[in-house]
Image (cartoon, rainbow, N blue to C red):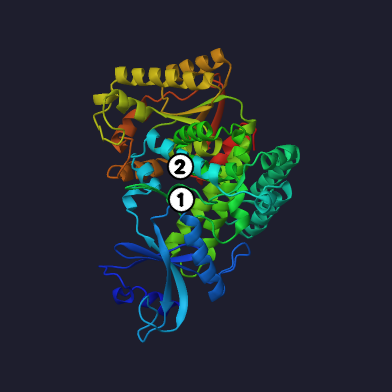
Amino acid sequence: MQQRFLKSLLNLSSYPDTTSAVHLIQTHVSFLFLTDKYVYKIKKPVDFGFLNFTTLDRRRFYCNEEVRLNRRLSPDMYLGVEEVRESLTGPSFKGDGRIIDYAVKMLRLPEECMLDRMLAEGRVTCADMQLIARRIAEFHLTADRGAEIDSCGSADSIFRNCEENFQQISEFVNITLSRHDLNLIRKWVENFMTRNAALFADRVHAGFIRDCDGDIHLENICLADQLYIFDCIEFNYRFRYSDTTADIAFLLMDLDFHRESGFGAVFLDEYIRVTGDRDVTRLLDFYKIYRAMVRGKVESFKLHDPHIPAEVKQRARDSASRYFRLARGYILRESLSPTLFITCGPMGTGKSTLVGELALQLGLENLSSDVVRKTRAGISPTTHATAEYNEGIYTKTATSETYRELLRLAENLLVEGRSVIIDATFGHRAYRENLHAMAERIGVSFCIIRLQCPEKIIKQRLDGRIHRRGEISDGEWQLYLQQKKEFEYPGNDEGLQIFIDTSKPLFDTIDTILNEIGIL
């Protein structure tokens, strides 16, 4: 029955508007049919406890709610509710047959203007983030409030949402997160709420519990002819009636997830300027953890959906695991004093992959020698600059200047109290000693992460990089063979060293590091 339903609605003749094609996108709760100009969103007949679309009346009601609520931030996008009718050829948006379902009809926004895509392509500016912050701040200042809404800001109500979340996540233990991590996060949340009961009460009394959006993240923002913020929570008022901090925490967490925390800082500064809500920072980590857990749960739900292809499920599994790791990371970084981490290993040993993941989980500032080197040379980081060994932009002089700049950048960040990880080869003792001496001088911890793996894997990695789009490194197999001849590995007198075999699973190697530095 479901296949017939989907197949019929992929026919061009099923739509009242002329279109050259129809594409289907699925989420865990919706079918979205994309025509040239519009999107028709049909709710799946599912019941997740917090969401119930199992009857036709429920789907009709929530379609109308979706239009009503989303017109608050995107009035021009939400066009109305369309009836899905039975016809001789199957379900259709035309005709006068029996009504079998309902769909929200929306203006189709340009995909190239979606914030997640613009961010990935480096097309987002600080002015864009300030614009988004002002729109959300103004929305929050005028959003509805009242006794019923305030009740959802009570500690009991918030704890109920958290506990419900943990219970629903528990079925994915050992699939997308470990039992240890779930227990760690749960305990932290319980302790935070106990210690900050007065703060939650103060937020209610100060009027910060509002009828919010509930689902503000990168994929729900579009910077086209105007700013669109869409797809709010319509299916459960408990997730929409919330502290305004919880609303912005979703976007800030998503920026962290995509390694764009700098834009998060720009957003937060402008949001606080407009609202005057400086206490928002006291609750941000709590709500970021909550949002990361929700996102991980939603991605995990896709694993049970029989209509979602296997390759999409694998991406969802990976994404869910990283969201759960980020939630854990917000907690673990509380125990990390300012630290300078440097990598040490020849090209192809997996430095950038490990650094990116460790930086994500611990909120580290990530400095890359490849980026610094190419920036100093006046070229784009993704522009290939392959040359013979020690030639081109890789001369010994250029390399010394690159490490000198890395030291300067790292010191500036460390004196501000931030932890830093430097993604570089560090194949000469002098470069490591300079960074170690700087760390000791300003009183921060220092750690060398030594990477190694079988040469067969190194060759596979380097050969695979050559034509990879967006690749920053210029490493090649022949260059590796020359580099390893003169590589100076650290001695026992160079401080804390953590040995990592990057042929092992990435998350396992990250946990090894976290255990070695004593925060896991």
- The image quarter containing residue 57 is bottom right
Q: Is residue 1 visible?
A: no
Is residue 406 or residue 299 the one in the foreground? Answer: 299
Residue 114's disc number: none
Q: Which residue appears at 73% of the width and 50% of the height?
A: 156
Give the distance between the C-alpha atoms of the residues marked 2 and 1, in whole angstroms.
Answer: 8 Å
- The image quarter containing residue 164 is bottom right
Question: Secondary structure under badge 2?
Answer: helix
Q: Which residue appears at 35% of the width and 59% of the height?
A: 108
Q: Is residue 93 visible?
A: yes
Q: Quadrant of the C terminus?
A: top right
- Residue type at tag 2: Arg
Q: Which residue appears at 30% of the width and 23% of the height?
A: 376
Q: Which residue is mark 1?
A: 73
Viewed as shown, does residue 109 lie left or right of 421?
left
Viewed as shown, does residue 237 lie left or right of 269?
right
- The image quarter containing residue 61 is bottom right
Q: Residues within 10 Å of mark 1 (few under 14, many from 20)?
A: some
- Residue type at tag 1: Leu
Q: Which residue appears at 61% of the width and 43% of the height?
A: 287
